[in-house]
Structures are given as structure tokens and as C-alpha cells.
Image (cartoon, helix red, strand yellow):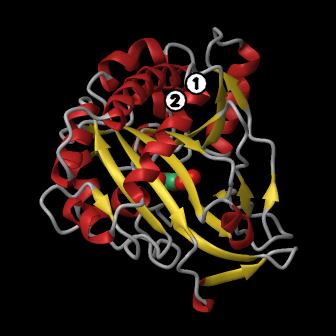
Amino acid sequence: MSMYVEIPILDISQPLQPSSLSSLTKAAKEWGFFHIINHGISKDLCIQLQSLSKQFFSLPYDTKLKLGPFSSLKSYTPHFIASPFFESLRVNGPNFYLSAKTSEDLLFHKQDSKLSEMLQEYGNKMEELSKKILRAVLMSLGEGIEKKFLESEFSKCHGYLRINNYSSSQVENNNIIMEDDDDELLVEGLGMHTDMSCITILYQDEIGGLQVKSKNNNNNEGEGRGKWIDIKPSEGTLVVNIGDMLQAWSNDKLRSSEHRVVLRKPSIVKKNNSRFSLAFFWCFEDEKIILAPDEVVGDGNKRFYKPFLCLDYLKFRENNVRGKFEKVGYTVKDFAGIKAQL
Ligand SMILES: O=C(O)CCC(=O)C(=O)O
Ligand SMILES: [Fe+2]
């Protein structure tokens, strides 16, 4: 069964105090997840985006399929690709308006689009927020790291959004992964994966279901396998997690954690059969060669990754079917990790 652990909360509007820095260091290393508050994203903006997105997702399938996955645009991921319960619309920055409007124009011709406008506003805010968060995360890596590397290594980062819609209308018995303590039926809305980004900022609605896998604790008692921890929704907070690019760049000082989304059938039924989330991925440019700087690795420490081209890793992941990560290794470790010498 799942567990609940207090994931640290960072007030992103305040200058970083030594105490918040140390809790951030711990969160980024232990969990790869933390919450932020006072981020300047209004509840109203999120609610409006949710309701406008709902209009999109409620379009007939044939209509949505004009946007992907087999059309040239590839902005739409239908059900049964990542999971039977998951569908998603991708919107690319930095011109979020243009990206969203291009998708919409393929479906119907409207003069203006409230959804595209709001996505531009949200995307701009996410970019600003990502820079702030990255600054804090680099500061947590040690004295001078942020001054030396924020500008030189991260100035060409770019972002994209994924609007995620989960529904349990397709639940069949063979999808059920477990029964909860309250005999609720659980299905996997999005299978276990790591994000490829440097950092991801996530808005989730009040339904819940996001879970992160805790670190293997190789003590004598447990089997050394991680446990699923709930990342509960909390009003006014956004979830931040470290992605593969930053895990490799930090030589494992920052953790890109495996996470998933489980759907509890009864609760989702109450809310018109759906769960909404909005994920923003802040990523290195495709041409970036990811290599941890000596200062980050530290004197006398081993490197855990060979240098690699960012695009090559993205392609590696694209070519491997999502959702099978539990059985076969498709993470950045498998791609560029240096095996320990025996
Ligand atoms: O919907 C969520 O809460 C998480 C989504 C997610 O992990 C992703 O889009 O990569
Ligand atoms: Fe994710």
C-alpha cells in the first residue's frame, strides 16, 4: 500500500535562507520532489485552463486524432499509448500561443482562442518560475555553483507543456493493479517513468493519485526496494521534480525519481470521470552535450555518466515503449551510465 511522507515546501517568493537551502538539498537528493508555494500562479488561471482543456478533450476521437499521434503535428497522445486512461495535448514554447493555436486551427477556425492565450500566459510564468527554481537547486549543490553555471550551462533551456486528462471510463478487470485498504480499485493512469527534463513543474487538480518511488534502502530489513509515496494535492502548491537531464548533469547529486499516477475508481467517478494535470518540462537544448562540471562532481569523486548529446537521449527514450520501465531499464543510467568496476 502507499505511504504518505512530508515532502519539503519551498517558498519561492523569498530569498533562500540557509535552512530552506538545506531542506532543498535533502529533498532534491532524497526524493527528487518538492512543493513550491507563493509561485504567482493564480488558482483562477488553473481553473480556467482546466475548463477550457476539458472542452478540447470532450471533442470526438476522430477530431482529436487530427492532431496525432499519426499526423504530422503529433501534439495529441490518445488513450492506449501511455495507458488506457491517459490522453494528452502537447504545447511547445516559447510561443505557446502559436503552438496551441496551430493545433486548434486544424480542428476548427476561430478568430481568437482563449485557451491559446491562457496557455501563453501560463507558459511565460512557468519559464520564469523554472529559472528561479533552477537557481535555488543549483545553490543547493554548493557554494558558487549557481554563479558559475546557471548562465553558462542553462541559458538555452526551453520548455513545453503537456495537458493531461485521465479518465477511468475504460476500466476493465485486467487493468486493476490492486485493491486499496478501503477496497477501492486502483488502476495505473500513467505507468512508472522518470521525466527527461531538467526540472518539471506540475499542477494537479484535487483528485490525487501522483506517487513517487522512494529510494532503495539497502538495509538488512527491507528487500531494498522503494515504496510508493503519495504526492497529495494541496491548494496553492505546485509540485516540482528533478528530471534525467539534471540528474546526469549533477552526477547523481540530484535525483530523477520514478513516479506514476494511480486512479482510484470511486473518487474519479465522482468528478465527471476525470483527473486533470498540467506539466511543464524545462529542458536543455537538443544540441547540448550533458557533462557534469568538475566542480559539481567534486575532487576525488567518480563520474557516473559518459558525456552525451541531449537529443540522442530523447531519441533513445522515444524508441522505447513507455510503461515498461519496471522490467527493462530505459533511464539515463542505462543510456549513459558508467558501470561500476568490480
Ligand atoms: O499527472 C500527473 O500528476 C503527473 C504527470 C507526469 O508525470 C508527466 O506528465 O510526466
Ligand atoms: Fe512525469
Residue denoted by label 1: 42
Q: Is residue 275 left or right of residue 182?
A: left
Secondary element type, mark 1: loop
From the top left corner, tell me how far across and down residue 225 is, in percent: 70, 69
Q: Quadrant of residue 282?
A: top left
Q: Residue lying farthest bottom?
A: 174
Is residue 268 shown above or below 238? below
Q: Residue lying farthest top?
A: 15
Secondary element type, mark 2: helix
In the image, 46 versus 92, the foreground residue is 46
In the image, 37 versus 144, the foreground residue is 37
Q: Residue at x 58, y 81 (%)?
A: 171
Task: State whether label 2 is within 8 Å of ligand 1.
Answer: no
Residue 246 shows in the view? yes
Residue denoted by label 2: 45
Amino acid carrying label 1: it is Ser
Q: CA distance from mark 1 to mark 2?
A: 5 Å
Amino acid carrying label 2: it is Leu
Q: Residue at x 40, y 64 (%)?
A: 334
Q: Residue at x 52, y 44 (%)?
A: 252
The quadrant of the image that shows the N terminus is bottom right
Q: Residue lying farthest left?
A: 72
Within 10 Å of the Cα at label 1, are there few (<14), some (14-19), or many (20+) other Cα atoms? few
Q: Quadrant of residue 212?
A: bottom right
From the top left corner, tell me how far across and down residue 260 is, in percent: 58, 62
The answer to whether the residues at label 1 and label 2 have Cβ atoms under 8 Å apart is: yes
Is residue 108 shown above or below 130? below
In the image, 8 versus 54, the foreground residue is 54
